Every structure is written in structure tokens, then in C-alpha cells.
Image (cartoon, coloured by chain):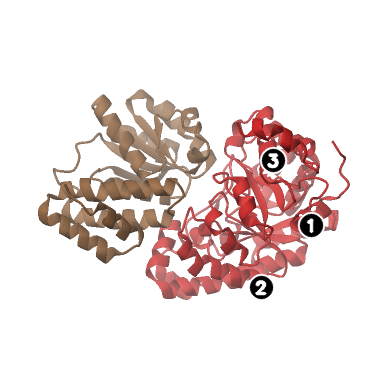
Amino acid sequence: MIENSQAFQEALVALDKVQADSLFQEALKDAKPIQVVEQLVVPALEQIGEQWQKGDLALSQIYMSGRFCEELVERVLPPSDPDRKHQPRSAMVVLNDFHMLGKRIVYSVMRASGFEMFDYGRMDVAQVIERAKQDRIKVLMISVLMLPSALKVREVSDALGDDVKILVGGAPFLFDDQLWKDVGADAMGRNATDAINVVETWMREQSL
Amino acid sequence: MSTTTMNSMQRTLTTLGHQEPDRVPFFLLTTMHGAKELDVSIEEYFSRADYVVEGQMRMLKKYRRDCLYNFFYGPIETEAWGADVIYAEDGPPNAGQPIIRSMADIDALEAPKISEAPCLQRVLEATRAMKAKVGDTVPIIGVAISPFSLPVMQMGFEGYLDLMHGDQTRFERLMKINEAFSTQWSNAQLEAGATAICYFDPLSSTTNIPRDLYLKTGQQIAKRTIANINGPTATHMAAGRCLPIVDDIAQTGTAVLGVSAWEDLAELKAAASKKLTVLGNLNGIEMRRWTPEQAELEVKRAIAQAGRGGGFILSDNHGEIPWQVPEDVLLAIADAVERWGCYPLDWIDDEAETLFA
């Protein structure tokens, strides 16, 4: 069992890259990279996400820690590494609006947690439907900032049907906790670790 | 219920003085709904100052609100810097590609001249026309994005966070340019007839950056900028949290604080403690699906939490009502303000338990 997760988290929140790197390297002496990710990085990012949700940490701290963890994990667990999770074909997209930070944070945290997924960047409804079908996507994560974009998730969910699980996130869903149901999503994530938990639950429940 | 005896300006000034006016002032910050009034597209509506003036005047009367709002759309400032604006049929225009695409672009960056930016001139023309119509009876709220928050549109949020955490020299240069622009833009609106400037500063919210970073950056920039704005300001967090920094915001010299639906209005009012007037915090996103009954309940709750003693303006929590919020909800909110917002607010004692059960 790797200890120091708390110290690692504190280093991330303080944007102390040297200390976080040092704790990460130290953990690697006694454990395999995937264990370090699961026992050091993921718990720290989970805590950071939860603290943001409670209003105790800021978005900039989540963004910077997610980015930094992504770099650390990339070094020891490249995308093709077989130890990366066996997961459903997944993609992440910013639907219809132009605010990319939320997706970037979730993408970083998920990759830092061992997930791989397509990054579709910003797309409109028709583009994301076409691309998701082409890539045979099973889990589609949609990020939005604007209410009109959130309402467009309905068009995506109607077009992709039950074969694709849709996980939504972003400010409109945080301000109205019924909205994800109104637009036909299968779940909403309040933060990046929520997204991980939802996808892992779907993997367990439905063998996606 | 007692009848009102003050005009909108008197009502607003009284509450800003932390005294109870005749009724809780009501700043319904509708922008795009003016296009519905005129039955034109959002793009067409914002293309003409006279449309915006007409829309604002109709909404002033229809919703019995206590302000006019010269805000066209968020990216109008970056439009002046050369960025594209992307219109939607059912929502606010978005900023297109950032004008700063690499950090090195900051080295050669120059602010636009307000007199040479047609989009900003349109806002000033609308402001002058509104002032001619209402004189000093209704506050006209102008808008400037804070120098600290503007780069989110100028260079994208990610790029800006990277700059802030990685290139202090260019960050400071960008702030210097933006501070000069924001001050000039604010003062031009005041000269055109705006009563006050809504200083939109969501990046300073504790939702977005930690307090210690705010104290080193957003707060210092706000102090310098607000000191050079020749009129009162209302700092707005555009739905971000701010409870831990209420005192810090008060030190910037601002008079009003626009707050989030994520925080408790009573706690915010207590924290503002006569240093700031609280503006908020009806949930604009949920408002889309409120019934008239729920709208009334939400108005009562907000007034019960923050109305007593003045120092409170009822508004939404973001600074812009979403296009999808139906007219009957807005009318129900307006009715509820008239019904429950008249001072003294004695009904609160009888209903507090039910309201917050």
C-alpha cells in the first residue's frame, strides 16, 4: 500500500511540482506504475475534485494538478501500455459551445487515472453523431458550459440510442440537477472523479 | 401591501445606502429577451442600437424592473480587439478563435481605440438613447469585463491559466494593457449616461482561483482599475462563489457584489455587513423550468434571506437571464417582487419556518 497520498495531494494543490514529482518517484521504487497511479495519483485527484465540489478548492488548482499528473503518468504509463484499463471505447467532446477547460480537466484526470479515450475537441451535434458511430463509441462524455449547448445533448442521445452511454458534465448541469435527465443523458458527473466512478460503474454493471 | 413611493433610482440609491427603500429593488438582467419583444433574431437585435434601446424600454415596463442594462453580449469587447463573434439562434453569442494564440502574441498586443470600434460605439449609442429616455429616474447599468477576467476570452481559459502560472512578465504586460482598456471602456459608458459599471470578474471567484492567488492578482487589478473608473461599480462573479473573499472584494472599492446561487444568501448578506450591497441570486438555469408558483417561492426566499435593512437588490445569479426562460416565469418573478418586496418585510417572521423547511 502506497502511503503519502495526502502529501502528494498537498503538493499538487500548492502547485509544488518538485515535491509532487519526488513523492511520485519515491512511490515507484516499491510499486509498479499502475499501482502508483491507482494508489497515489487517483486518490489525490479524487480528493481534489471533491474539495472543489464543496467550494474548498479552485478550478485553477484542479486544472494544474490534473495537467501535472497527466505528465507524470504519461512518463511511466504510455498510452499503449497494456496495464492501462481495459475499458469501453470512449470519447470526450465539447458540444456546440467554445469553452474547453472543463473537458481538458476531465480528460487530464481520466488519463492520469489510466483511461484512454478519443478527444474530439469541439463539435456540433451532427459531427459528434457521425464520429461516434464511425468510431463505434460505447461511452460518450459531453462537456458544455452554456445552457443552449446542454439542451442539444437531447439530439445526440436521440440519434445514438441505447447503444451509447452518455455522461454529461458542466455548469448548467451543476446549477440544475434535473437537467441531465431532461436531455436524455445516462448520467452526469459533478467533477472529474465522478466521471471516473460513473464509467467504472458502467464497466462493472454492464461489461461494456 | 403598501404602494411604492420611490422611482427606481431612489429605490436603488436607498438600498445602496443600506437603508430600506419602499420596495426591494429588482434588477432583472434580461438581454436577449429584447429580441423576442421585437420579434427579430438575436443577431439582428444586437446589430442595431435602436433595437436594443427599444427592447430594454419594453422590458423595463413589462417586467417592472428597476434598471436598464446596456449589456449586448459577452464577447463584444474581444470583438473590438478583432475576434469573431459566433451567433446562436437560442443563446448568447460566443467568442470565436482567441486573438492571443501563443504567449508571444502578448508582446505585440495593442488595445483597440474605443472610438474606432463600431461594436462598442453601438453600445455607447444605445446608452445615450436610454439616458435620454429615462434621465435620472432609472439606473442604467453598463458593463465591463474585468482586465483580469478578459483574457479567458482573449486567449482561452487553459492558455490563460498556463500564462498566469508560468509567465509572470507577459501576464503583467497583458494586465497593464487590459487595465487601460477596461478603464477607458468603463468611463466611456459613464460619459454616455451609464449610472454604474458592472465589473464582471468571474475569474476572481473562489470557484476559479484560490484566495491567495486572488489577493496577489485579481484583487490588486480590481483596486487599480476601480480607482480609475469615474463612477460606482458592481463587481459580479457571474455565478461563481465568493463567500470566502467578500471582505477582500469590499477592499477594492466596489459598492455592489453579484453572487452565486451556490452560496447562502443570508450568509453573504451577513458577510457583506453594510460594506457591500448584495445582488442576486435567483438560479437562472433552473428558472427555465420553474412554475409561476415556484418563481414566487424563490423570490420570497431570497427576500427573506437578504432583504431586511436594505443593502440588497434582487437579481439572477449570473448577470444574464437565459433565452430559454419563459416570459410567464419572468412575469411571475416581477409579480412576486411587488407582492412580497415592499418594506417593512414583516411577513418574513410569520413565514420563515415554512420557507426554509
Residue that mark 3 sits on? B304
Please, which chain is the residue tagged with disc 2 on? B
Q: Which type of secondary structure does the marked residue at label 1 adopt? A: helix
Q: Quadrant of residue B177?
A: bottom right
> Among the chains, which one is brown?
A
Name which residue type carries label 1.
Leu
Question: What residue lies at 54% left-to-right and 39% top-to-bottom?
Answer: A148
Q: CA distance from mark 3 to mark 2?
A: 36 Å
Same chain, labels 3 and 2: yes
Q: CA distance from mark 3 to mark 1?
A: 20 Å
Between label 3 and label 2, give the one nearer the viewer.
3
Between label 1 and label 2, give the one nearer the viewer.
1
Question: What residue lies at 41% left-to-right and 57% top-to-bottom?
Answer: A60
Tag 3 and tag 2, C-beta contact below 8 Å: no
Local crowd size for mark 3, using a 10 Å CA cut-off: few (<14), some (14–19), many (≥20): many
Same chain, labels 3 and 1: yes
Q: Position of residue B348 (x, y in %)?
A: 72, 37
Q: Which type of secondary structure does the marked residue at label 3 adopt? A: helix
Same chain, labels 1 and 2: yes
**Tell me, what hue is chain B?**
red
Q: Quadrant of residue B121?
A: bottom right
Asked if residue B278 lies left or right of residue B102, the reply is right
Residue that mark 1 sits on? B13
Name which residue type carries label 3.
Ala
Q: State whether residue A129 is above or below residue A84.
A: above
| Residue B19 seen in render | yes
Please, which chain is the residue tagged with disc 1 on? B
B352 or B154, nearer to the observer: B352
